[in-house]
Image (spheres, rainbow, N blue to C red):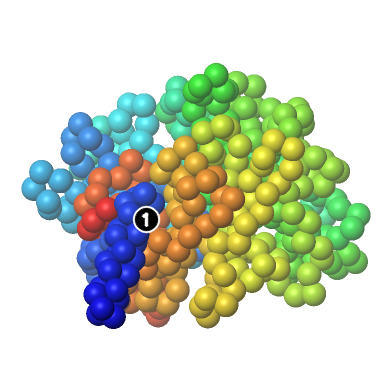
């Protein structure tokens, strides 16, 4: 009787777990090494690093190699064979910030933006559509000077926007670093520049440096206009002092309308072509963390994606909640949620990494933790989060990126953390594939 009852209980629990796994669309991953000793230390943000093309059945990826070179690699899914690593651009100097991001142009060529830290942005363009073969056109985007942390996106009509932090340093203040973008409507032949967010000067602190993570383009659909979603934090020093990135506070949000290049707050207020310093706190503030006693209260990689209703989902390191958190809009106010419960694991003192959208209200976040990547998901637009799975990489993880429009055999590009100089790479590159759903 007891054994029979116990068996029924465990059988019921198994069925419930299976049903829950099915309803949640749980993904499980396997990881394989892509390139050994091929990556160097990087401050890379969660930007576009590659894509899958169904017509040619190929995946293309990029990362930063020895001496801050831009490296590309391609997978032919028909033969399941990766190309050799190919250097397609050389940075003017060696720096951990010079990492590349990749976009597919409307001409099907590959566009790789890279090579800058407080310096002029570079662009390398493939000579052939959907191919890494041949000699790439490697050049500077001269108008994008003093650039750091480039975040490239492309709109439905093929317009490039590359957002970046401008190391302007007005009056030689190291904490004056606003946010702007360069724009091209002719596949990178010519560019224009626009200041987007300018916090300088501030009267409550000297945190005038803009930091952000993922920038996301939302195409027009379902009666909604197109948007480029931006979320950021500010850093610098406290009032009366000036220093670079000593402290950080607050979470902010706005979106850019590609139809007129005006910026708007969450309520649709037109803030013009530049968000000025008083407008940040008056119209764009999502979370006021206060001035920290030490460190950065929202992390330095505040990322944003969009729900199908047009509202943003913001992902940041909410230190007051003990770990990564999210914020979304309910039509009248911001709703916050904790992603990783403080008591469930050892606190990882690292910025959040990737934010992936996989349904109208469904998102995943990927959080490296030593040799593992913890995956959390929401299916209700960020109102609550569940732990989904753990990806065992077998080596200490630094960055993880979701490949755009990914094929199951190559969904994640993962880079190792560890030793190695900027000249001699000692970090491996991995591919995460979906083993089952």
Q: How many marks?
A: 1
Specify few, some or many for label 1: CA neighbours under 10 Å numbering under 14, 14-19, or 20 or more: few
Q: Determine the image quadrant of residue 280.
A: top right
**Seen in the image, is 160 located left or right of residue 245?**
left
Residue labelled with disc 1 = 20
Q: Say which element carries label 1.
A: helix
State the residue lying farthest toward the left.
Answer: 79
Identify the residue shown where x is 67% and y is 67%: 321
**Seen in the image, is 428 located left or right of residue 285?**
left
Identify the residue shown where x is 17% and y is 53%: 82
Identify the residue shown where x is 69% and y is 28%: 262
Identify the residue shown where x is 34% and y is 59%: 16
Q: Let me know if residue 366 appears in the view.
A: yes
Answer above or below: position of 140 versus 247. Answer: above
Across and down, in percent, residue 312 comes to 60, 41
Quadrant of the rendering where the N terminus is positioned: bottom left
Answer above or below: position of 419 versus 407. Answer: below
Across and down, in percent, residue 317 comes to 61, 63
Across and down, in percent, residue 357 comes to 45, 44
Question: Which of these two is toward me, 313 or 335?
Answer: 335
**Seen in the image, is 54 located left or right of residue 419?**
left
Question: Which of these two is toward me, 192 or 36?
Answer: 36
Answer above or below: position of 310 versus 385. Answer: above
Q: Let me know if residue 135 appears in the view.
A: no
Answer above or below: position of 154 versus 428. Answer: above
Across and down, in percent, residue 364 comes to 45, 53
């Amino acid at each position: 009787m007891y054994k029979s009852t116990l068996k029924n209980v465990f059988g019921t629990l198994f069925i419930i777990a299976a049903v829950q796994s099915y309803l949640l669309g749980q993904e499980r991953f396997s990881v394989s090494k892509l390139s050994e000793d091929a990556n160097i230390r990087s401050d890379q943000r969660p930007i576009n690093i590659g894509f899958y093309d169904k017509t040619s059945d190929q995946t293309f990826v990029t990362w930063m190699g020895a001496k801050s070179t831009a490296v590309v690699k391609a997978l032919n899914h028909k033969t399941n064979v990766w190309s050799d690593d190919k250097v397609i651009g050389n940075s003017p100097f060696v720096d951990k910030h010079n990492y590349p991001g990749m976009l597919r142009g409307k001409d099907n060529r590959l566009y790789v933006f890279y090579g800058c830290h407080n310096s002029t942005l570079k662009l390398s363009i493939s000579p052939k559509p959907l191919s890494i073969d041949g000699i790439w056109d490697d050049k500077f985007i001269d108008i994008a000077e003093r650039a750091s942390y480039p975040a490239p996106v492309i709109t439905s009509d093929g317009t490039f926007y590359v957002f970046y932090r401008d190391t302007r340093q007005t009056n030689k203040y190291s904490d004056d670093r606003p946010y702007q973008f360069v724009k091209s409507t002719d596949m990178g032949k010519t560019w224009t520049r626009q200041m987007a967010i300018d916090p300088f000067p501030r009267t409550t602190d000297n945190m005038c440096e803009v930091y952000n993570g993922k920038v996301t383009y939302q195409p027009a659909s379902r009666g909604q206009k197109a948007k480029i979603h931006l979320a950021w934090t500010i850093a610098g020093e406290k009032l009366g002092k000036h220093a670079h990135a000593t402290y950080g506070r607050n979470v902010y949000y706005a979106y850019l309308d590609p139809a007129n290049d005006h910026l708007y707050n969450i309520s649709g207020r037109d803030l013009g072509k530049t968000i000025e310093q008083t407008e940040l706190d008056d119209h764009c503030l999502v979370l006021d963390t206060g001035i920290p006693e030490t460190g950065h209260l929202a992390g330095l990689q505040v990322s944003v994606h969009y729900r199908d209703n047009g509202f943003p989902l913001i992902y940041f390191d909410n230190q007051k909640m003990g770990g990564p958190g999210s914020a979304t809009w309910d039509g009248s106010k911001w709703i916050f949620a904790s992603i990783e419960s403080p008591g469930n694991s050892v606190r990882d003192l690292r910025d959040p990494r990737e934010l992936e959208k996989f349904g109208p209200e469904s998102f995943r976040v990927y959080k490296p933790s030593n040799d593992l990547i913890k995956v959390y998901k929401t299916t209700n637009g960020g109102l609550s989060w569940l732990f989904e799975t753990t990806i065992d990489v077998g080596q200490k993880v630094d960055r993880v990126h979701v490949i755009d429009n990914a094929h199951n055999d190559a969904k994640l590009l993962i880079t190792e953390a560890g030793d190695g100089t900027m000249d001699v790479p000692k970090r491996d590159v991995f591919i995460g594939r979906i083993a089952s759903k």
